[in-house]
Amino acid sequence: MLPQGDHLFKRLSLDETLSRVWDVYMKGFWTFLKICLVVSLLNAFIWSWLMLPVLRWVLGVTESTLLSNEFNDQNNDKYTLDAALLTFLHGILEALLASVASGGIILAVAFIYADEQEDGVNGRLNWWVCLRDGGLKNAVTLITASAITTIGEVVGILFFWVPGIYLLVIWFLTNPAIVLESNRNNNSNGNNAVDGEHPSPSIRAILKSQNLTRGSWCYCFCTALIGYAVVVLMKILWIMIVLEGIFKDTDQYLLYTLTGSLLMTVPLALVLPIFAILQTIMYFNLRVEKEGMNFEALLKDLGQTTEHGSYRQVSLLETAHAVLGDDLELHTESIPQNNSNRLSQVETVQGEVML
């Protein structure tokens, strides 16, 4: 169970972070799964119906050749480079679309946090709203940032690994910064950056990640290492047990068919939520520690991404009461939201000032 109230926004240790990841994963499991399945299907169709025909034409390879044992024989040097190119491009496509799915999952995690503050009612945990507002609306920024960070990390890994690992850690929180803080900035002043900030939202998010992780290297490194290890291990196990085991003797495991492409993206639906949840909770942890993040700050992050506005409105009732005294009457009425099982308590002011 997730804690409620102020206990939800506190700095977590590494073991508490992992426990929180599991609690959030179970609470929003079906929402996360739907987001990932939709993106996985999109990935498979784009690859099989759009990219593969173009690549076959460019490489001068027929479909029958592509599915032949000769093309997929690792000991055959004739098609080694072609096969490597196709595998690489498929990985790029999967990574870019995964960043969009990650945006939806990050927003869903933020909704879970907000809903827990409101007595645990998941009134806005809708997979389409999360994918649309968290992923699709930020797709260009997410994909741009993913391309920048991936290129930087790959180049860093080529230089004796250490620079690449360093960049993996300090840029680990880029996606949560895009989804939450970009929405907050858009809500307040459009797409314009605050004075002194970089005009590109992708660069702003990368710099934000660097600022949050600064001074917390050990915690960030261990958390990021666990996240990447889960993703890589799941991929390896899936390839060894399912693709190379069960489907080894059929063309279903091949990357060059619709079914094979779908099978390749199954690990994405299973482990991407865990990875994105880990990023988001780590992002919350560091903002709690360095910026004093609380529930009101989270509402500002969600202000532009919801159809119902903020859960809570900050008023000046106490000040008004001090000025008007007995002429101010406070009443509370229940106003139903879009979700019929959700009520929010709204304070209203009624009264007359006798002149």
Image (spheres, helix red, strand yellow):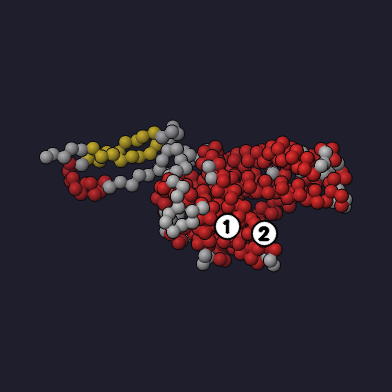
In front of the other: label 2 or label 1?
2
Q: Which dot marks residue 154?
A: 2
User: Viewed as shown, does residue 86 lie left or right of 108?
Assistant: right
Q: Quick one: 126 or 215, which is closer to the camera?
A: 215
Give the percent coordinates (x, y) of residue 288: 45, 58
Give the percent coordinates (x, y) of residue 38: 62, 38
**Is residue 21 at all visible to an observer of this figure?**
no
User: Viewed as shown, does residue 19 lie left or right of 162?
Assistant: left
Instruction: Give the secondary structure at mark 1.
Output: loop
The answer to whether residue 316 is above or below residue 343 is below
- Identity of the residue drawn at 45% across and 50% down: 192
- Identity of the residue drawn at 51% across and 52% down: 201
Give the residue type at disc 1. Answer: Phe
Quadrant that contains the C terminus: top left
- Identity of the residue drawn at 53% across and 55% down: 203
Give the percent coordinates (x, y) of residue 277: 56, 50
Q: Which residue is mark 1?
A: 172
User: Viewed as shown, does residue 199 lie left or right of 52?
Assistant: left
Give the residue type at disc 2. Answer: Val
Q: How many residues crowd around disc 1 within 10 Å: few (fewer than 14), some, or many (20 or more)?
A: many
Instruction: Give the secondary structure at mark 2.
Output: helix
Q: How many residues crowd around disc 2 within 10 Å: few (fewer than 14), some, or many (20 or more)?
A: some
The image quadrant that residue 294 belongs to is bottom left
The mark total stands at 2
Furthest residue in direction top, as rendered: 340
Give the percent coordinates (x, y) of residue 345: 35, 40
**Is residue 316 at all visible to an observer of this figure?**
yes
Q: Quick one: 336 or 251, which is closer to the camera?
A: 251
- Identity of the residue drawn at 66% across and 38% down: 41
Mark nearer the N terminus (2 vs 1): 2
